[in-house]
Amino acid sequence: MPKVSVIVPVYNVEKYIDKCLNSLVNQTLQDIEIIIVNDGTQDKSIEIVENFLTKYHSKIKYFEKKNGGLSSARNYGLEYAIGEYVAFLDSDDYVEKNMYEEMYNLAKKENADMVECDFIWEWEYGKKIFDKRRNYKTRKRDSIIKSKTNKMEEEIINAEKKEMLKKPRVVAWNKIYKRDLINKTKLRFPEGLIYEDVEFFYKLMPHLKKISYINKYFVHYIQREDSISNNQTEKTGDIFKILDNIFDYYKEKRIFNKYKKELKYMSRRILIGSSMKRILKIKNTHTKRKMILKTMIYLMKYGKKAYFNNTILAQNNKLRICFGITKLGIGGAERVLVDIANELSNEYDITIFTIYGGGELEKELNSKIKTICVFKKERKNKFIPIYVLICGKYLYNRYLRGKFDIDVAFLEGPITRIFCFNGNKRKIAWIHNDISKVFGKNKKAKFKMLIDKGIYKKYNQIIFVSEQNKKAFENIYGNISKRKIIYNYINKNRVLNLAEEVGENDNLKVNYNKNINQEKKLYRFEIGKIDEIMKKEKNFIVVSRLVKQKAIDRLIRVHKRLIEEDLKHRVYVIGDGEEKESLSKLVEELNVNDSFIFLGQIENPYPYIKNADFFALLSYFEGYGMVLEEAKILNKPILVTNTAGVEAVKDYDKKLVIENNEDAIFESLKKVILGEYKFLEKKSQDYNYDNNYLLEQIKGIL
């Protein structure tokens, strides 16, 4: 393994690349690898690079890629770096020959995650400015008594980090980084944006346990007239996106409050001291004015007395938010909304608007939350969706206009079409499903998609519960509105408490519908204790709506094939829906009604999940898969088809991702029943479910 990997992106630098590479191949540190990434250069740079490859092939790795910018090239190089430490060097700069040896030796001596050196600003006409790292007041470690405790050392490091966060040198190329740390944190440079070093540095900083500094000027930072930093355009506005990304990251990692003061100071300092200087150099007057105005807005946003929820509220005056959903019945999105609303109700004035009232989950709402409904109960009337579409503006004006600060359409479809009208300050749309599949493929679906494209453009921001759903949306509608991913929030303690509600003496009542000659008869399959019944044979629990999307018919056919191979097991399905009758009929036709059991709609499914052997969600397509989060909380082995739902279990060990077809599901369930997947049967209780950071993300968009 090389001691240091140096990544050098190359793009149109024929005038500088020779000096850059000479400074690297002649390093006193012999155990070094130089990774050159040709980012689609169009000049003679590569001819020069090829000469170095011929002479120093043992030290240089060479890669080519399409032009994607500096960040893209650096990220590409990171995939191939194998050094103990990694460094970055721009191809128009050069370094002193002893740089990496001395920095590496210091890193090893002090077991540092990052080592930083000084550098020289160097102009082609001869001017030089020496850039020395400021002395942080917490930096003088040698003066600390030798008997200091680990806790004292930790406090010192944390204090130094806070100082560095306020006034750092964020450039990437005057440092070496422990490569394992970068891989562990999965940090990469933001592609397509300038100020890429700012985002990388601030995301890396909280993960550093030891930072070292060497008081020597090792890097020559060449100032070019044609460089990106000296040619200001509308791209200067990338700083706003970079700052948003940094704040979102700290909230996601649940460390925002720890570094809040320093981050806000840093933001104001960058906006005034760096960004504004660049903006004033923009030649286009309209662009310049627009950027200045946006800077003023962001300065207010990061002001000392501003709330970080994008709205400065008067004291004791809560932000009024209206969430909209079709009905608060038992369902994944509905469950998420109830949990979110309850958690936010102390800080915000929350109202929930529904088309249909009387949903089962309404009774779980905090007493502080107000409700509005168009119809008191759900009506099976095919004209109601048409009424909602045609009269959406009337409904909005009647129930919502002028009454709230933020409208949140929490589910795609009718609610999104009602909430799109002007009247309140801000609008947010929430997407829970793959928008390309949720409406089907017929002419009616295409008509809805055509209408919705104009509707989504009216929203200030669109939230997706998975990366796959975001991509599906963008493939259809393009880059409309501001878009962000926030995974579904669920109240962990509620799930754990409800899972204990059914005690040892409580009975399990198993029902299914039998349909013969259109005559419906209700049969009770068996009655007994949950834990005794569900442990008789290997069993799978499914919690879902009985709709085509969930592929229950496919699971029934797979179940039949397994039974025919004498692989005894049971499948329990909790849920109700429009496919209930046809699915019950299929169970009867295949004669598996003794082992494929519909439990019906159950308000508390958690005791059943807890006592099952495996939790299954084998749908044709999914959103984030809320029930998967609930299964994770209960530490259940999870079987899931390769849909967007996989994102919910990406950090969970006891999962089996199955190809989305009947044969693959059959083969996988066969192996599960035979006990061939030992990792699923692991009894480990060390999975720590914690998603409180999602609440911070939600507050961040309000």
Image (cartoon, grey):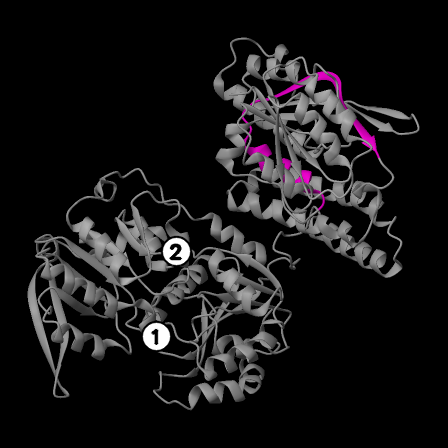
Mark sitting earlier along the chain (1/2): 1
Residue 525 occupies which quadrant of the picture?
Answer: bottom left
Amino acid type, callout 1? Gly
Left or right of 587: which side holds 26?
right
Q: Residue at x 20, y 63 (%)?
A: 558
The answer, for residue 702, to whether it is visible in the render is: no
**Distance of mark 1 from mark 2, alpha carbons?**
19 Å
Q: Secondary structure at mark 1?
A: loop
Residue 77 occupies which quadrant of the picture?
Answer: top right
Q: Residue at x 56, y 20 (%)?
A: 112
Amino acid type, callout 2? Ile
Residue nearest the observer in this picture, 343 or 314: 343
- Residue holding disc 1: 359
Outermost residue on the top side: it is 146
Left or right of 283: which side holds 429?
left
Residue 37 % position (x, y): 65, 36
The answer, for residue 141, to whether it is visible in the render is: yes
Residue nearest the observer in this picture, 334 or 96: 96
Residue nearest the observer in this picture, 589 or 399: 589
Residue 18 % position (x, y): 77, 27
Q: Residue at x 46, y 84 (%)?
A: 444
Count of picture labels: 2
Q: Give the number of the disc on residue 490.
A: 2
Quarter of the rendering occupied by the C terminus: bottom right
Residue 696 % position (x, y): 52, 51
Left or right of 423: which side holds 111?
left
Question: What is the magenta range?
Answer: 194-223
Q: Secondary structure at mark 2?
A: loop
Residue nearest the observer in this picture, 433 or 147: 433
Magenta segment includes 46: no
Magenta segment includes 217: yes
